[in-house]
Image (cartoon, rainbow, N blue to C red):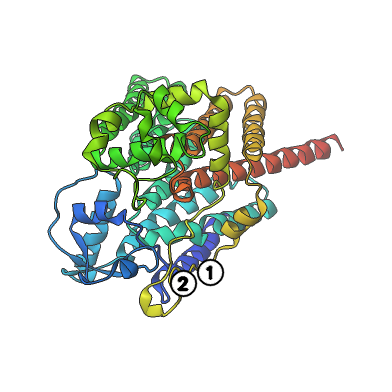
Amino acid sequence: MIRKKNMIPLITVSAAAVLLMLSLFIKPLIGLADNGDFYRIMHSVGIKYINNGESHYERYFGFTHVLYSLAFPNGVHYWTTEVPIVYASIWLNRLLFSNNTFDIRFLSLVYSLFYLAALYLLIRQNRHLPARYYFVFAIIYVIIFTDIGYSSYFNSFFGEPVSYVFLLLTWFISFHIVSQKMPSHWLLPLFWLSGLMLFGAKTQNVPIAIALGLMSLLFIRLRKDKLWRSLAIAGALVPIILGALILLSTPQDLRVINTYQTVFYGVLKNSPSPEQDLQQLGVNPDLAVLAGTNYFTKKTAISPDSPQLIKPFYSRITYSKIAWFYIQHPYRFLLKLQATAQHAADIRPLYLGNYVKSEHLPYGSVAHFSSLWSSMKKSILPHRLVFYFIFFMVYFAGAGAVWRSSPDSRRKIEASVYVLWGAAAILTFVIPVLGDGEADLSKHLFLFNVFFDLMLLSIVKWIIEAFSQQKENHAAQD
């Protein structure tokens, strides 16, 4: 029985590998079309579209691309932990395929290897569950995390797959550290590195560094030797310092876009009094003519990149002003969170096509292979803020039950780690509307979806553990 149980992670991860192979590597390949964001990474690492004469219609939104041309890197314009991942895939491509042409499947291969390793470790971490539950639990892991809504990002230059695989790995490492009676010193640097890859993947991920720093402080209590304590204290400071550096290195053009959308497509969108809102933000109320527009809206009253907006608007708006505005208008903030909730179960942006043009499918065709979980989330879950409030309350109550379940300090640290991950999940729910308004919420809530799924599986695991413990207690009494 023990041997069969030990085979469960290998069997289920092998099934996940087959699903990835069928969807990402064998025609018809499934990927994700460019919405204009690919340029930041492609320009930095020296990747270009092969066909310079390709129309906007062919290049963006509707169709994916598999082959690109390799050129000289132009220097990192946008600092992100996606860059080393793409460089690794370019190295593999040059080694095994071509020095001039880049096949995006090599990037997908790198992501797939990280993902399969994370999936194996996460499934194996639950091997304490009774065998019959363990096998079903492992299958659920595969169905959820190998969903095409997640894996289609692997064949793209978006930053989401970096966030995805390293959230799974960092989640595993955090609980692995707590589970060890005498955790190895190398686990802490590994935790930092994985965490850096997570919060460094996208600017909106940076606040997660705070939760990781607090986790590192919790780990101090796991060992008493000086080296461990020094590493844990350093681990509390390093993520926050690196996170601040990442924010400071955000390109100016990206700051401008986000600022515009946070105000005009966030604060002012559906506002009953846009002129008054702008006055409260310290901005000329005449700019209310831009209310409800995003940076890429065509034919606006004033062009978003116009010099008219630099001093009167961009130089006056700060995120602290926006946060203070919402503090003063909590009902308006709740309305924005409700708008967020309407997209919170969207694992993938359905406005982006999944297939190459040569497949002769309609423009923007979306793949349905291995999409059970993403389809269920979109069609079954209530798209209401109150639902997510209840979900978080249940999750935190479960973490509280873990805290109370044992006097062991290690168990209490584990419960605290669950709470910090829950707090990080709340940040990923709130930050998109604060940092980019209501623009592209389906994509900006990608990481929240991963958090939601990990938290949901944690709740299921706690229920199984409680049920199994109850059965053991009854058996002992009999």
Q: Nearer the viewer, mark 1 or mark 2?
A: 1
Is residue 219 visible in the rendered image? The answer is no
The quadrant in which the N terminus is found is bottom right
Q: Which of 406/47 is in front?
A: 47
x%, y% of residue 353? 43, 66
Q: Which of 148/177 is in front?
A: 148
Q: Which of 117/360 is in front?
A: 360
381 vs 228, left or right, is right
Mark-to-mark CA distance, 1 and 2: 9 Å
Name the kind of residue labelled 2 in the image.
Answer: Leu
Q: For mark 2, what is the residue? A: 22
Category of crowding for the residue at label 1, using alpha-carbon neighbours closer than 10 angstroms: few (below 14), some (14–19), many (at least 20): few
- Identity of the residue drawn at 47% across and 48% down: 446
Q: Which of 422/57 is in front?
A: 57
Numbered circle sitting on residue 369: 1
x%, y% of residue 233? 35, 21
Is residue 409 visible in the rendered image? The answer is yes
Name the kind of residue labelled 1 in the image.
Answer: Phe
Q: Earlier in the sequence, mark 1 or mark 2?
A: 2
298 vs 73, left or right, is right
Using the rendered view, name the quadrant where residue 334 is placed: top right
Secondary element at image label 2: helix
Secondary element at image label 1: loop
19 vs 4, left or right, is left
367 vs 81, left or right, is right
Using the rendered view, name the quadrant where residue 103 is placed: bottom left
Labels 1 and 2 touching (C-beta < 8 A) = yes
Q: How many marks?
A: 2
Numbered circle sitting on residue 255: none
Q: Is residue 101 above or below residue 429?
A: below
